[in-house]
Image (spheres, rainbow, N blue to C red):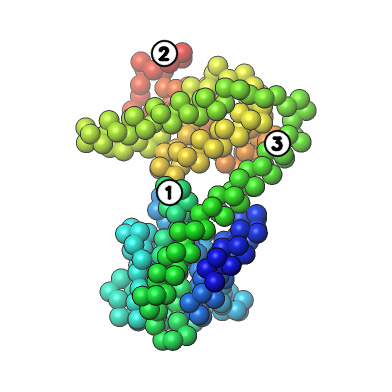
Amino acid sequence: MLLKAKQLISQQLDLTVVLRRIVETAIDLVDARYGALGVISPDGSLEQFIHVGMADDEVSGIGRLPEGHGLLGALIDDLQPIRLPQLADDERSMGFPEQHPQMESFLGVPIRVGDQVFGNLYLTNAASGEFSADDEELVTALASTVGFAIDNARLFERAKRRQAWLAASAEPLFFVNGGLFNQWVRQVVQRAVRENRGSGREPLGTLVLASEPITDLDTTAAEELVDLDDWLAWRGITLVFAEIKGPVKDTLERYGLNDRFTDERFAPTVGAAVDAITGELRTDIEDTPDV
């Protein structure tokens, strides 16, 4: 049954469809009434919440969807399965909105994609009254095998995005240094993270890219920037461009990346970017635009 479920999930390439299929499959596997999948954002909260089992009027009556507090937050923090016969009896439970359907038994397990935690799978109201150890083992096995389907869907979305960029670019070029640049920045960040951890300094929060040497961006370079930005964001690091040329910024907008790289991601100089981060005026950097 688990193999068949895996095959059904892997047949889909649209990420939203894949995530919903995972929830539906988990519900069927353990005969649960409700199910949901919470996608974890870089700051540790829930940036997306896909739910199955509630009627539209129930959803509209609830209002705002969960953000990852209480029991859901505990699963985000501990990354270990949680199985409860009664939600209300657990001290971490924060209750439900007035229009929320009654939920009793609970089972939650993390979902990993590669070496990263993608989100958590939540199931409630087992038909048998409560979830068993076998149910937990089954859903954990499902969660451990669907990472590839999520990864494939992400790759498919990336391919569609690149196709759109190609259509937007009059003369697409192959930017051979994009991948090397991406790898180099990752190595620098990983080394800095290790050094910070060893010295007890505060964790990295911002990476300032001196962008003046960049004269143009093709679709491959833009794709590498998005990939790097996602990688940094997952680690709680914001990518900021300093001294970027106007035409390059226009190219980012033409590729549809202005919603990702908003105005606060750009600084006129490296010094100005550092000032915004530290709140202190750094004239030594301000006067040295080549840094």
What amino acid is labelled 2 in the image?
Asp
Question: Residue 244 appears at what percent x and percent y?
Answer: 56, 23
Badges 1 and 3: C-beta atoms under 8 Å apart?
no
Quadrant of the snapshot with the N terminus: bottom right
Question: Residue 41 appears at what percent x and percent y?
Answer: 46, 52
Q: Between disc 3 and disc 2, whose residue precedes?
A: 3
Vertical arrangement, residue 149 with respect to residue 97, above or below: above
What amino acid is labelled 3 in the image?
Trp
Vertical arrangement, residue 125 with respect to residue 285, above or below: below
Q: Residue at x 70, y 36 (%)?
A: 165
Badges 1 and 2: C-beta atoms under 8 Å apart?
no
Label 1, label 3: how far apart the Cα atoms are: 28 Å
Which residue sits furthest bottom? 128
Q: Which residue is mark 3?
A: 165
Category of crowding for the residue at label 1, using alpha-carbon neighbours closer than 10 angstroms: few (below 14), some (14–19), many (at least 20): few
Q: Which residue is mark 1?
A: 116
What amino acid is labelled 1 in the image?
Gln
Q: Nearer the viewer, mark 1 or mark 2?
A: 1
Element at label 3: helix
Q: Which residue is mark 2?
A: 287
Q: Quadrant of residue 83?
A: bottom left
Category of crowding for the residue at label 2, using alpha-carbon neighbours closer than 10 angstroms: few (below 14), some (14–19), many (at least 20): few
Vertical arrangement, residue 12 with respect to residue 133, above or below: above
In this rendered view, identify the residue nearer to me: 156 or 242. 156
